[in-house]
Amino acid sequence: MQPFHTLSGVAVPFGNSNVDTDVIVPARFLKTVTRAGLGAHAFATLREDPANIFDQPRNAGAPILIAGDNFGCGSSREHAPWALADMGFRVVIAPSFADIFAGNAFKNGMLLVALPQDQIDRLLAVARDHDITVDLENQVVTTPFQDRFAFAVDSFRKDCLLHGRDEIALTEARSADVAAFEARLRPWVANAAQRAA
Amino acid sequence: MTGPRTLYDKIWDDHVVRRGEDGTDLVWIDRHLIHEVTSPQAFEGLRVAGRRLRRPDLTLAVPDHNVPTTARDRPNPDPQSALQLDMLTRNCAEFGVELIAMNAAAQGIVHVIGPEQGFTLPGLTLVCGDSHTATHGAFGALAFGIGTSEVEHVFATQTLQLKRARTMRVTVTGALGFSISAKDVALAICGWLGAGGGTGHVIEYAGPVIEALSMEGRMTVCNMAIEAGARAGLIAPDAKTFAYVEGRPRSPQGADWDAALAYWRTLPSDPGAVFDAEITIDGSAIAPLVTWGTSPEDVVPITGVVPEPGGFADPSKQAAAAASLAYMGLTAGERLDGVRVENVFIGSCTNSRIEDLRAAAAVAKGRHVAAHVRQALVVPGSGLVKRQAEAEGLDRVFIDAGFDWREPGCSMCLGMNPDKVPAGERCASTSNRNFVGRQGPGARTHLLSPAMAAAAAVTGRLTDVRELMA
């Protein structure tokens, strides 16, 4: 995972609520066997409109996305954060996020910032013409004006993001605990094979 | 933890390998189901890092998302789907995972075959790279969808780093009316909670309506937990659960069965257990429901009308509703009963089990699909469901009525295989998502129950099934 500290840049003032994973990347583009290249298909349906927000010159390659509540609802497809990351996004700011999407985004080094709707509304207005700064260490979003919006972040995820930690390697460091747990499994839990009739 | 505990608390506590000081626990995973779409990058990750798959014997693979539902003896017409299917076969062989192959008798949708095979059992932790893994919660298993990085994490360690969820109990009181099914209950809950209402929670479904449901019905309800934002749904295991599980190919036997049963009986939430949220829904008041918009929360009784976007309190919901109506080609105030459909889909991990096919066949019997309906697909959830339906003569009922009787898979629920709804056309669908473009670019989806879908097929319009069956 690529470490994340502070990022300043263009924020796309998208704002839609209940943005589902089929909107982020339609199922017909899931037939890939690699992680890369999905950015071309991100928001495919919305981007059929030539005037769409994502392809406006100011927003192309922007690192921050601002959306409405329940962002990323629907499928567990990790293709959604892969597609967002491939477009260039490293931060999504919204009032709330779907649980599975939030986990997937984190595992791809993407920071999700949850802020109240009134602060989102302010950022949507500012972002039309000005860059936004997201500081993970100090857990604050700032604008070129006086705005300072503090956000909460899970301490485990913050540590992983700041240091770019590999979660599988972290778990492997606990392998003695895992082996001890495994040795105590009930016999019928430890066996998923077909039984003789 | 002392004091009364919920079902969720008990399963969680029994699976914590190591408690994290920061609230993130390391949790053991008992069962892992995989399919062709969300696993290739996880296998590739193992290969790149030189890792092995820690417990291939607790992992089971089946292709379902993009398998064709016709002509499986011929080469797959879609080279990208063929590549994904071929990679699943090769990855399973390389890493020692058992695969139920596309042409095997037991092949089917991953959430149908898990319970059928006895791979899903009460009290287990079960994961799959698919959000509808919530389905397995019907057995009192803690089951939830995961992303591909988590698939790789489970491959490598048989664990996940997880934060404990909040708990919510949804109690459905009363008794369901004539022709009202588990799907109507699931849709009613989505409508009540909203698409994000269950976020951060695990829902336990309870009350007389839930207890009265069959295992198939309970699976339908848990399946749609994710459509209300809850990563998992749970139902306390009871005599019905144990009767379903007993004698399945992978279920415990003999002394193991007795030990398992004794353990499973300790799982239901203790009297006095406290939930973070409690919701009660009057089951007696649930009518046959249908969605009008592009979120599963957009439900209305078939006797109702398309809502006025301006009537929603939340400004963002007003805008979303207006956009939904434009996409769906509907007008505020229009009656749902009578809206013309060109496609009907009976299938998906929500509604493709034997009971669903029986309910649809009861409506289709002696009737015929309306002349203007271009596609009316019946896609059984598994080869075993298909065989059972054929033994009961349901295939003849559907075929005689003009439906297409297909091979098992996810099919038109998400249109990854050739089964798609053409742009601008409507589909009465027993699936779980009415998202924009879900069933194909420009497709207009109305979610409803199997009986309601069959009613729509034979009349060619969204129809109150109670009138047909009265």
Image (tube, coloured by chain):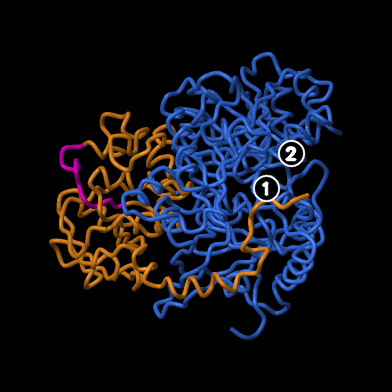
A59 relative to B28, above or below? above
Tell me which residue sits at (26%, 53%) in the image.
A124
Judged left or right of residue A4, residue B233 is: right
Question: Which residue was labeled with disc 1?
Answer: B220
B363 relative to A113, above or below? above
B242 relative to B41, above or below? below
Is B185 inside the magenta-drawn segment? no
Q: Are marks 1 and 2 in contact (CB under 8 Å)?
A: yes
Q: Quadrant of the N terminus of chain A?
A: bottom left
Instruction: Residue at the far right: name it.
Output: B470
Q: Chain of mark 1?
A: B
At label 2, the amino acid type is Asp
Name the element at disc 2: helix
Colour assignment, chain A: orange
Judged by its main secondary structure, the magenta piece is loop
At label 1, the amino acid type is Thr
Q: Label for residue B356?
A: 2
Which residues, given as a range, are shown in magenta?
A56-66
Name the element at disc 1: helix
Name the foreground residue: A36 vs B155: B155
Residue B329 at what x, y percent from top left?
A: 51, 28
Chain seen in blue: B
**Marks 1 and 2 share the same chain:** yes
Calculate the distance from the C-alpha at mark 1 to the C-alpha at mark 2: 10 Å
Tell me the crowding category of disc 2: few under 14, some 14 to 19, or many 20 or more residues within 10 angstroms, Cα based: many
Tell me the crowding category of disc 1: few under 14, some 14 to 19, or many 20 or more residues within 10 angstroms, Cα based: many
Tell me which residue sits at (55%, 52%) in the image.
B59
Residue B397 at what x, y percent from top left?
A: 80, 23
Residue A3's image quarter?
Answer: bottom left
Name the foreground residue: A164 vs B106: B106
Tell me which residue sits at (73%, 45%) in the image.
B287
Residue B24's image quarter?
Answer: bottom left
